[in-house]
Amino acid sequence: MTVSITPEALFSPRADEPLLHLPLAELVSQTEELLERCDLFRRAARSSLYGQRWRAAGIKPELLQGRAALRRLPFLDGTDLIAMAESRDSLRKALLTRPRIWVTSRGTSGPKKWLPLTLADTAHWFARLRRVSEMLSVEPDAPIPTFVLAINEPMPRVSNALPYLWERADYLTGGQRLEFIVAAMTMLPHNHWDRFVVQKQPQWLMASVDDARRLAQELEVKASRALPGLRRGIFWSQPLDGPAGARAELESTYGLAESFSLYLSAECREMYAECPAHAGLHLWMDGVIHEIIPDGQAPAGHEPPETLFVDQAPPGTEGEYVITTFTEALPLIRYRTGDRIRVLDTAPCACGVTHPRVLFTGRMAASAA
Amino acid sequence: MNFSEAETKPQVAASFVNHYWEPDWECAPLPELVARLEARLAETDIFVRAARSPLYRQRWQEAGIDPAAIRSYRDLQRVPYTDAADLRLAQERHHPDEFVCSDQSPRFWVSTSGSTGVPKWVPIGGADLELARRIGHRLAYFGEKPARPDDMALAIAAPAPFISDTSTWPGLVNELRGDGPQDIRQGEAVICSFEDVAEGALMAFKRQVTVLIAFPSLIMRLAEGLTENAPLLAAQQLKQKFTLANLLAYLVTRLRQIRPRDVVKVHTGIFAGEPLDPYRRALYDAWGLKLSYNFYTFSEYQIGFCECRAQDGLHVWMDVSLPEIILQADLEREREEEGYVPPARPLWEASAGDEGELVLTHFGDTFPLVRWRTSDLIRVISTERCLCGRTHPRVNFLQRSDDLVNLGVIRFSTFTLQGKLEAITQPAKVARWQLRVSRRGYKPLLTVLVRPASGVDEAEMVAAVKTALAQVEVLRGGWESGLVCVPEVRIVPDLGDRLPTSGKFRPLVYETEGEEARP
């Protein structure tokens, strides 16, 4: 059993609004209940990704209880996922159930990782996207329809889904405010979709930071002059804030009034976004367990590093982001994402959402990842 | 294993007969479908809305068409044709929003490939998506066998902004809505773009692919690649891990050619983007397919036609579109006689064996097509009830009727090549040329016949033309990737015998099977 979402909840506008405002302690308590209900540890132990490794560490999954037990479990990282996809056998043994579709990571920091999604996993992801789209839809002066340029990547990369699920979330939950052109950067030299985009003048731009930069270079005139109607940008794959943050650059390049940082990951099957308060990205506490390996611990090869649950980490804590997911086809247990986060606050946000806020500040150094 | 006709023409299995998504529509007698079409024409406001679009407005006004007065097929026959060139021209002059004929704003804009020049942009609305989805569900019951949960599909799609990129995620959301056939459970899929075919195919092989959904030429290229690289891959695997199985695999690749059918058990292929017939035999041979289906759609139309289990033509939906055919003889006359407007006849009144250009009118909400010349040549298979029970006319798609050089995945305009050939000055200018498209085996072969403006060293002239061909980027990409044969160039003293009686130049000729480019 995994997290299940009813179609009613999936397609009702703001169906999970109450969840967004629950006190943090209650969210943690719900996670504990979910762990028990989903029997996550015993289920995961059936996967070759965990079974042997856990046995070798003397772990009996049937004795594991509550999220505190996670700290006894070994970490998983990208190399494990790459090894899993090496052969027919390793894939078969790792999967808990037959997936519906496969997606990959971007592959910018090494070989692509293949991740399976069942229909239930897709539902979870759609629900997340709907939540994010609703959170970012509050723009009182936006024209109707708002024209969105979404630069995605071709299948099977995970960002391919973003505009299509966003559009469906808008359409099926009654918003119907958005009109999309979806385009891949790889097609730009072949069919010059930028010319059409200039004609249509989008109000929103959704893109990875890299693609947004590339598009600006490809446009015949300065981006803010070519696309003067752009008001809002939603960017992923690189931080918008911090020393290497791209926010100021992209806002200036495109003349944006506002930009939002989005965290999108094939491995996590999650999507976190900044709310309109712009005080960090909300890490959704329902359906994911978030840990952080604080900086300054022993290098790899020694004792496994200690972690903190993000909801218990003091503001300012920095380190590697570790997740545990409840994915049906292949849950990731203590997966070291290789992404750095800084905990901003675990107190409720000005927007009213109680889920902790972090900044994604880039990739871990190769040695640490 | 020898290929036999029986392999490509499976008998209709009793187990899956009479399953339809919308039997009242799919199997209604043809006269009834025509009557419903007439009734729909009498009540639709589609023509009034279409008349707002710069695609139709001016030309209809010039032709004296009152869109509100189009109430029957007879009325519709007075409406001028529209084609891709009209759309391209209109889009050069008008803002995209002017082409939206619905009161609802579009959900997506998709682009055509731009093979014949500037890409065209098509708005798709919510109602259009819903219609395409509903008709798409019919296809779930088209096959000899329904999809199974243990199927594993490899699908190759074009990246956005092409329409095929829009299908995956909205399709999954539809499943989440509980929409679609409830008695068929879909299996697993690896869906990848052209750019990721190698990686996607490798993953699909590891997951024991059983269904292929792609351009047939791409799938054949994939098969060739596997055969070429199997010895190398087996050697690498053995080097990485010395096991008895890996050693055996390596030895086998030294002794015989490995084909995909030796590695995976693919039972079904669904093929789109180009006619399937030239590839069918090779696909069965290389992949061990048991069933294959041809699928047809295009960006402006979005609704799919498909072969059913009887494999005797693709069903053209009469309930969501009004299909017509311009017969070959009239197309010939149009080419030869300036200003001649060829008549179209309703597809439901065509005879088996008729060949000509498909013309479609459909009831799209956002971007309705009205007497749209598809530039696709069809052969009418039958207007009788099909073995599968469906009554919608069946056709096969042959090739293009316009200036598009269609080599399957590889497409470009004759005007693109014309520019390159006209730029040749050494060793001589090109006085006259003609492109002939044929096949070597299943693979498209382009032959360029050239008559130089003066007597020259033939080898030098051939080299100059080949250099010009290589400047057509998409064509060069096609032969470098092995999707099409390397083009051939022939110097001919005269092209006069290749002209029709009118003497009008025809730059592009598709050779029928057995006919070869004469030296």
Image: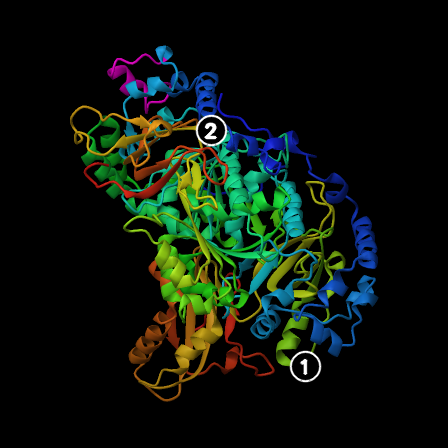
Please state the horizontal and vertical placement of residue A104, each as a whole percent of the image. 38, 41
For residue B174, what is the image quadrant? top right
Total marks shown come to 2
Nearest the camera: B170 or B157?
B170
Give the extent of the magenta segment: A45-61
- Applied colour scheme: rainbow
Q: Are marks 2 and 1 in contact (CB under 8 Å)?
A: no
* Helix, strand or loop for disc 2: loop
Question: Any magenta on residue A181?
Answer: no
**Which residue is denoted by mark 1 in the rendering?**
B339
Q: Chain of mark 2?
A: A
Please state the horizontal and vertical placement of residue B106, each as a whole percent of the image. 62, 56
Discs 2, 1: same chain = no
Question: Spatial distance from mark 2 to mark 1, Cα to Cα?
Answer: 68 Å
In the drawing, what numbered circle is on residue A286? Answer: 2
Q: Is residue B409 left or right of residue B236?
A: right
> For mark 2, does the 10 Å Cα neighbourhood hold few (<14), some (14 to 19), or many (20 or more) residues?
some
Under mark 2, the amino acid is Asp
Nearest the camera: A197 or B149?
A197
Q: Chain of mark 1?
A: B
Please state the horizontal and vertical placement of residue A216, each as a whole percent of the image. 38, 63
> For mark 1, does the 10 Å Cα neighbourhood hold few (<14), some (14 to 19), or many (20 or more) residues?
few
Vertical relation: A320 (above or below) B199: above
Residue at 78% in and 73% down? B65
